[in-house]
Image: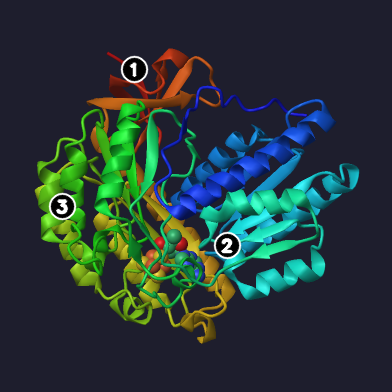
Amino acid sequence: MAALADYSAYRATIAVPEDEETARQREELKEAAKLVAELADKLGRAPTACVVTFGCQMNARDSEKLCGILLEAGYELTEDEEADLVIYNTCTVRDNANQRVFGRLGHLHAMKKKNPGKRIALCGCMIQEPTVIEKIRQSYSFVDLLFGTHNLYKFPELLHRMLLGGGMLIDVWDKTDAIVEDLPVLRKYPFKSGVNIMFGCDNFCSYCIVPYVRGRERSRSSKEILREVEKLAADGVVEVMLLGQNVNSYGKGSEGELSFPELLREVEQVEGIHRIRFMTSHPKDLSDELISVMRDSKKICRHLHLPVQSGSTEVLKKMNRRYSREQYLDLVGRLRSAIPDLALTTDIIVGFPGETKADLEETLSLVEEVKYDNAFTFIYSPRTGTPAAQWPSCMTEEEISEGFDRLLKLVQQTARESVSRLEGRVEEVLVEEMNERDPSLVTGRLSGNVLVHFPGDASMIGHFYDVKLKENRGFYYIGERI
Ligand code: 5AD
Ligand code: SF4
């Protein structure tokens, strides 16, 4: 069995219950804890739990919530899937994410045959799809618990019921307006944290399943967000990442609520927070006010993830992105003239239905023009229930894969060029962890999100250092502390 992960340094943020649902879940957590204690007596050790996260930052944050609850219930957390309880927090944005989960479930089944007391739970976006639930019911009956994205806050209750036994428990809602605050959270990093500012998405890009599995857009109250950021700062957090599928439309639809730029201004006032990041920005909602707030801020990082998806106006129209190539490029121009050292990253889809070879050339030329610091490139994956899934493709599989390879090469080349502007500079780095391969190095991040490896030790984790950026290795730097 692999070594248990050392979570002892990570503190749980446990707050006073605020409303009835929170109080109810806290009662459920106590009941679950009694059953976990009984299990510990039987096993002669604390039962172990392993949470595996697929997908995006929102899922990573949700997993921290699951871990907080598991820890309080009495589980010992591990990264080993031999654990007594394994939870897969799934993603369904592309089909390969689903396939990976189904593939790995086979291994979990083999483990459960050897250890019948093992419990397996699945949650997250995939579980919001009725076809997935049906498939699991039919062919993966060894799974103990299924729950979706809308009722994650009910996890204490679901854990309790699962531990009572009685066959596969399925609790999936198709929507919710509730935002339940103040359940335990176990942060992965003591010094940085994601903060949900909104849930769901109303954009309905024609390829995307997120609005269907994460539901309608709803913003958390700015008071709650600021309270959380203040609590995190008091707890030693120096960097927050404000999370939402479409942060630029924060507050819309909640009367009297702050706008996103106003929220950023407030977060900036929180003492102890040195870096503010946010994710994800939709180009159509990025306001001039946001650009000036970023420009004037001392804390907002010089990085913007601005998914373009395609460089062809025709394709963007079919994708329902609601901006043209020209509008996107104009926005990039305005951002760069206001904030010259801004690092830009993006997402791009290749092989969208109706995309022609000429459209793909437009995407390549846009990448050449913008020179992103990094770009995440995806081959289009049809998602059942989305409009684009019905539309035929214009390119053959070979053309798509050849186009994808060309795009990848171009991204690598332009990213290297773009990142090389930093070579020789001295920049502030927040050290995040020990280097995975070389124990004499630490790994940290620049304000612009580029990783830097430089000589150091574990005592430096969570602290800022001035580092000379000596060697550009493409997407990262080798540096030296000065
Ligand atoms: N196929 C391929 N990529 C997709 N994305 C979202 N939906 C799909 C899909 N059906 C990509 C987009 C988005 C990122 C998170 O995932 O580029 O920005
Ligand atoms: Fe999906 Fe578009 Fe919403 Fe992003 S903005 S989550 S791509 S629908």
Identify the amino acid type marked 1.
Glu
Q: How many marks?
A: 3
Q: Quadrant of residue 295?
A: top left
Q: Which mark is residue 262?
A: 3
State the residue lying farthest toward the right.
114
**Residue 13, relative to residue 386: is it above or below?**
above
Left or right relative to 423: residue 124: right
Q: Which mark is residue 480?
A: 1
Q: Between tags 3 and 1, which lies in front?
A: 3
Disc 3 crowd rating (10 Å Cα; few below 14, some 14-19, many 20+) is some
Q: CA distance from mark 2 to mark 3?
A: 32 Å
Label 3 sits on what residue type? Answer: Glu
Q: Which mark is residue 148?
A: 2
| For marks 3 and 1 on the same chain, the one whose residue lies earlier in the sequence | 3
Where disc 1 sits, the SS reads strand
**Against 165, is 424 above or below?**
above
Question: Sequence-wise, which precedes: disc 2 or disc 1?
Answer: 2
Quarter in which the C terminus is drawn: top left
Which residue is at 47% across, 83% downward?
Answer: 387
